[in-house]
Image: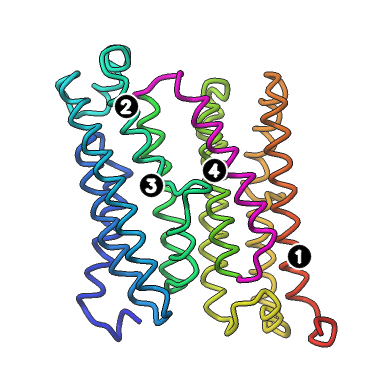
Amino acid sequence: TLLRLGRRAMAVLLIFIMAICGIIMTRDIFNLFVFLELVVIATAGLVLLSHNEHSLGAGFKYLVASQVVSVLLLIGIIFSYHVVGSLNIDDLAAQSALLNQTMPLAFFLLFVAVLIELKPFPANGWALDIYESAHPAFSAILSAAAGTASLIAIDKLVSIGGSNWLALASGIGVFSFVGANLFALTQNNDRRLLGYSSVAQIGLVLTVIGQRDILGDNYLTIAGGILLAHAIAKAGLFWLSGLVAGRELTTWSALQGKPFLIFAFASFLALLIGLPPFPGFYAKWELVHILAADGRLLLLSLLLFGALVEAGYLFRWFGYTIKRDKDLQ
């Protein structure tokens, strides 16, 4: 598609990837705002690569929602600079007590803006429309790369807010994980189901970020394992969806007779569920042990319930793939 559209379309993709790298590497809060804006603009352009009739509306809704995020983030940056006198994230983290005592609204605006950019449940309608209508290759990048970059951004901001904000991050994360998985149960459109699954996985990692106070040295291992499994699996499933003509889950029976694609599909689902020997299994296993040892049983129960629901609809999807047409009828 990019070869057909030419260099200008490729330049938009290049800007998108550059901005994601900027979000990950920057330690300046204003640079974070600039790179987030570039991601928004490039996303709106790349959504239009799709021939889906709903892609234009999805891109417009995403632009409107993202401008609200930008306004909140910019106001929060102004207030933070007024209090601390620096835009460096490490300086803001060192002065977090002063910032939270003098102007707690500043960090609240920063936190809420980047949190909305994560597209948590239920504030994710525009993101689901993009996942459903955009080119599957771009949806793969949006879910795997842009979602990961936004989580790294929220991880940087939590260091500014301090431990008082960890419980809120965990609460929003587990609500998003369970709620998105429950809504995915009723989906028959493959890409919308993948959209809900992306929202759920991002919510799971946000929950891990909120538990960093008890995870200690295992924090990066657990968060990284879940992120790696999600990125590989979600990118692979979106790419596979480009090989299937229909959008109903039952149309994935077209993979029958193609053992390599069936193996890839099963591997991607196992990555999402967290089956061994994939990294998600060891990350989730360690998370369960730490939560149980610390007595956070309610949170653990919600995470296990959400994981069970996720496994249910993913196994159902795989069942449609291996069933014969006469069985489906």
Question: Nearest the camera: 164 or 109?
Answer: 109
Q: Which residue is mark 2?
A: 107
Label 4: how many Cα within 10 Å (few below 14, some 14–19, many 20+): many
Amino acid type at circle 1 is: Arg
Q: Are marks 4 and 1 in contact (CB under 8 Å)?
A: no
- The percent coordinates of residue 281 (x first, y second) are 68, 44
Residue drawn at x 27%, y 24% as measured from the top left: 90
Q: Secondary structure at mark 1?
A: helix
> Residue 307, relative to residue 78: is it above or below?
below
> Which mark is nearer the camera, 1 or 3?
3
* Label disc, if present, on residue 117 of the rendered structure: 3
Q: Secondary structure at mark 2?
A: helix
Residue drawn at x 31%, y 79% as measured from the top left: 2
> Which mark is nearer the camera, 2 or 4?
2
Residue drawn at x 20%, y 75% as measured from the top left: 8
Amino acid type at circle 2 is: Phe
Q: Which residue is mark 1?
A: 316
Color style of the picture: rainbow
**Distance between the alpha carbons at the discs numbered 4 and 1:** 22 Å
Provide the residue span drawn in magenta.
Answer: 160-189
> Residue 107, relative to residue 32: is it above or below?
above
